[in-house]
Image: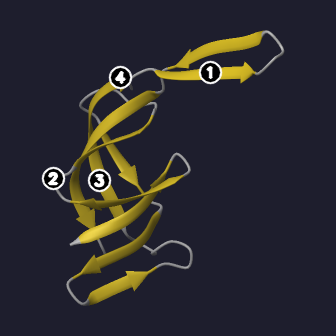
Amino acid sequence: MYAVITSGGKQYRVIEGQTLKLEKLPAEVGSAIDFDKVLMIASGDDIKIGKPFVDGSKVVASVVSHGRHDKIHIMKFRRRKHHQKQMGHRQYFTEVKITAIQAV
């Protein structure tokens, strides 16, 4: 059984027991989070597709940790103009573990 959820403007295909890194969520480590925006649930040949969300279904996850991804280096360069600019960015994330997929 798997589900497609949306979080942080992105869509994720999740199964029970999976851990994934999402955009930073305002939750404490160890707490449970309910994802109500479920786009699709599939169990074998039984597939439920929402319009836009599947009514009465949710995905339950627990927060494992918070952190930051590896640094991304950004380089802007203008040839023959004696101009270059360097920047770096580290995105915050919340690591969650999917504990249950509940369908109606």
* Residue holding disc 2: 17
Q: Position of residue 89 (x, y in %)?
A: 53, 20
Which residue is painted at 15% across and 53% down in the image?
17
Which mark identifies residue 3? none
Whether residue 104 is visible here, answered yes or no, is no
Left or right: 81 as drawn, with respect to 14? right
Disc 1 target residue: 75
Nearer-N-terminus badge (2/3): 2
Question: Residue at position x 24%, y 90% from top?
Answer: 45
Find the distance from the CA under tag 3 to the CA under tag 4: 21 Å
Of badges 4 and 1, the one in the foreground is 1
Identify the secondary structure beneath mark 2. Answer: loop
Residue 101 in view = yes
Residue for point 61% across, 15% down? 87
N-terminal of the pair, mark 1 or mark 3, is: 3
Q: Residue furthest right?
A: 81
Q: Earlier in the sequence, mark 2 or mark 4?
A: 2
Q: Could you tell me the amino acid type at mark 4?
A: Gly
Mark 1 and mark 4 in contact (Cβ < 8 Å)?
Answer: no
Spatial distance from mark 2 to mark 4, Cα to Cα?
A: 20 Å
Place residue 67 in its image quadrant.
Answer: top left
Sort mark 4 into few (<14), some (14-19) or many (20+) by Cα contacts within 10 Å: few
Q: Which SS class for mark 1?
A: strand
Give the structural element (helix, strand or loop) at label 3.
strand
| Residue labelled with disc 3 | 60
Q: Residue furthest front?
A: 80
Q: Tell me which amino acid carries mark 2.
A: Gly
In front of the other: label 1 or label 3?
1
> Residue 78: percent from the left, percent from the top?
77, 21
Tell me how far mark 4 sits from mark 1, CA to CA. 24 Å
Q: Nearer the viewer, mark 2 or mark 3?
A: 2
Residue labelled with disc 4: 67
